[in-house]
Image (tube, coloured by chain):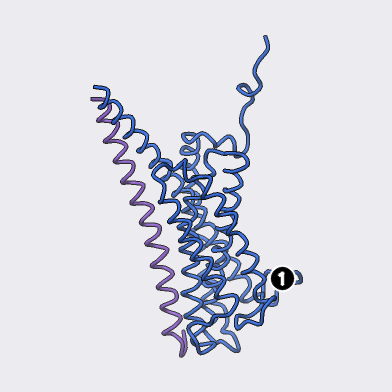
Amino acid sequence: MFGEHASFILPAYLITASVLAATTLTIVLNYKARKTEIKLLENEQQK
Amino acid sequence: MKTDPITTVKPTGVWSLANPTRFMGFADRIIPVFGTVTALLFLAGLYMAFNAPEDYQQGATVLIMFIHVPAAWLAMMTYTVMSISAVGTIVWRHPLADVSLRSAAPLGAVFTFLALATGSLWGKPMWGTWWEWDARMTSVLVLLIIYLGLIALSKAFEEPSEAAQPLAVMTLTGFIIIPIIKFSVDWWNTLHQPASVSRFDRPAMDVAFLYPLLVMALAFMALFFTLHLMSMRNEILARRIRSMKMKSARQRGNR
């Protein structure tokens, strides 16, 4: 399907998918970490 | 009774989202919708791309076009969004303009990197070289360096509000690179081919390639807006955490 240049086409798609997935995951994990931190700070301030 | 118009006029448009709490509510509602649209567009775009015919010169290598070109377009579009945000900071002092600018910068760097990487993987089989210092490739590399510089500048200040003005000014200064990238293939004798889609006359590309390309471009754009909103949400939370920590420190100091 990818012909003689498969060794260029497949890495191009793999790099793109990996980088975009890693970027999305970083943002999602960042969000979860900050929500947890806010919850902890709110509990601390209520004490 | 005379009422003060400044405090009684209901904010509209982007100003209605100037309140971070209101923006967070908006973001929480809209992000899942954008995310779903992004996924559907990628599914449709990839299906169309992998079912497009092979190019008579490039063969199957034309498949790289469907990720390289959208990445390059988004690299420039993101900088344009940042520049509009910079104007929002300097001219209108919109509270979320700086948040938008900071959140977009890493995404722009990612798209620019992908444009360079996929371009290199396309260039080697087609041109016989991974890289050439021609006008288009060099100017896109300069764009990546500008993005990295702005990210570094945003982290150089401890207080985000102190960085807002310098960051906005530097962003607007760097905007000159966008028309240079766009017209580089016209102004200079370059290895990179001239524009095939965004031309003043009709696109010089068969619809068999044009339609998948446009769908993939929409998918990349939807992804950018989804990730941008998510990043803005994270930035607002980070500022809220900073405020809470400062408040705690002051309370501990007063005891």
Chain that is purple in the image: A
- Answer with the quarter of the image where residue B192 lies: bottom right
Vertical placement of B32 versus B6: above or below? below
Residue closer to the observer: A3 or B16: B16
Q: Is residue B114 visible?
A: yes
The one nearer the camera, B137 or B69, is: B137
Q: At 37% across and 51% down in the image, what residue appears? A: A28
Q: Residue at x 41, y 51 (%)?
A: B156
Residue B154 image point, x, y percent: 45, 51
In this image, A32 relative to B110: left or right?
left
Between residues B120 and A32, which one lies in front from this camera angle?
B120
Question: Which chain corresponds to the colour blue?
Answer: B
Q: For the C terminus of chain B, give its image quadrant.
A: top left
When the figure is inspected, residue B153 is found, relative to residue B22, above or below; the finding is below
Tell me where residue B152 appears, x and y as whole percent: 43, 56
Instruction: Give the camera-side residue of B14 and B38.
Output: B14
Q: Which residue is mark 1?
A: B199
The quarter of the displayed image where residue B136 is located: bottom right
Quick check: can you spot residue A1? no
Q: Looking at the image, which residue sits at the far right?
A: B201
Quadrant of the snapshot with the N terminus of chain B: top right
Q: Is residue B54 above or below residue A44?
A: below
- Picture coordinates of residue B79 (x, y %)? 56, 58
> Mark 1 falls on what kind of element?
loop
Q: Is B217 displayed left or right of A27 in the figure?
A: right
Q: Residues within 10 Å of mark 1 (few under 14, many from 20)?
A: few
Q: x and y percent of residue B21 in the render?
A: 46, 34
Tell me which chain the residue with mark 1 is part of. B
